[in-house]
Image: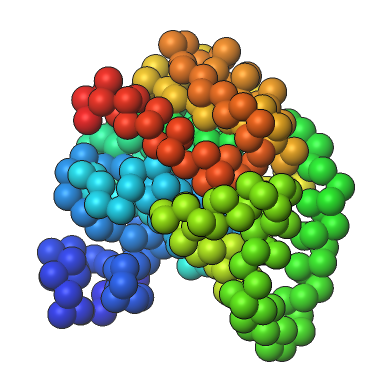
Amino acid sequence: MSTIKSQSADARRSPRFIPLTDKPPVFTTDTPLGVIQHTDGGEGPAFLALHGGMGGYDQSLVLAETLLGKSPAYRVIAVSRPGYLGTPRASGNSAAEQADLFAALLDRLGIERAVVAGVSAGGPSAIAFAARHPQRCAGLILVSAASGRFDIPEYVLKRLRWFGWLVRVPGLMSLLAWLRGRQPETAAARAIGDPALARKTLDHPEAGPLLISLLGSTFERMAERMPGTLAETMAFADLPPLPFGEVSAPTLVIHGDADKVVPFSHGEQSARQIAGAELCVIAGGGHTSLLTHIDEVRARVKAFLGRIGR
């Protein structure tokens, strides 16, 4: 892959990257295992953030900021997993292939070890990374993460089919993104399920903007988020057993006990199968408990990172 030179400090330090945007720097990196899109910013130990369905590097950034805060003492690598935005699906079809791709990216970045955080559909590849590359995983954080086979709720499948139709209509996604931005309360209530909790989350000085960013990004470049989303959604019914027994890194599992997308049993399984794992139960928390209970989540993450060396 050819390299385009940039005037940015990041690009001068790492000329193998192709800068795509200025804020934040977004790069496409060619590894021996395939192309991967990612950001790279901050100073300190590495923190690798892995988004869920309908995601991309932008939602990986939301995950990292939600867990760590606005100015973390970490070097955050937020990726677009295969099939999302600028990372082709061919770069990693399975959780194991994606895990190896992440390791190859760390090689190109000169990073030996990283704390890895995976949310929702990003859980299997995060677990696979910790299992397949134990010397490179400083810690594992699983948030509302899938940990095995399950049937996707019918309302989720209907929504995906609806999205698949919408992306074919020119200009419609831009209109829907604009409408969602004009009606954040409606979008938040739909995502969270409880209008009062949605309002409380929107009113939170940090959770509110993060929630709006997360909801708004879904309709931006949706067609480029669909290949990974559809492939992973269909594959969950036949997901091979994950290598929990090979995970040796300190692990924190965060899961709401009222999650209707990825059942709470998935969090329980991860915590039970991974030796020494901590389980943080978000009482009454749904699939968006990462944001609806942001203060509780951050407190647990801060304590966990402190125990493992940060």
Q: Nearer the viewer, residue 176 or 226?
A: 176
Is 184 located above or below residue 104 in the figure?
below
Q: Residue at x 67, y 49 (%)?
A: 196
Is 113 located above or below residue 33 in the figure?
above
Q: Nearer the viewer, residue 25 or 105?
A: 25
Which quadrant: the N terminus? bottom left
Q: Residue at x 80, y 59 (%)?
A: 159
Q: Is residue 197 visible?
A: yes
The colouring scheme, among rainbow, by chain, secondary structure or one colour, is rainbow
User: How far across and how far down the image is residue 151, in percent?
Assistant: 81, 37
Q: Is residue 229 visible?
A: no
Is 248 located above or below residue 310 in the figure?
above
User: How far across and how far down the image is residue 39, in percent?
Assistant: 34, 60
Query: In this image, 10 relative to 179: left or right?
Result: left
User: How far across and how far down the image is residue 263, in percent?
Assistant: 71, 31
Which quadrant: the C terminus? top left
Residue 74 image-quadrant placement:
top left
User: How far across and how far down the image is residue 45, in percent?
Assistant: 21, 40
Q: Nearer the viewer, residue 213 or 204?
A: 204
Residue 249 image-quadrant placement:
top left
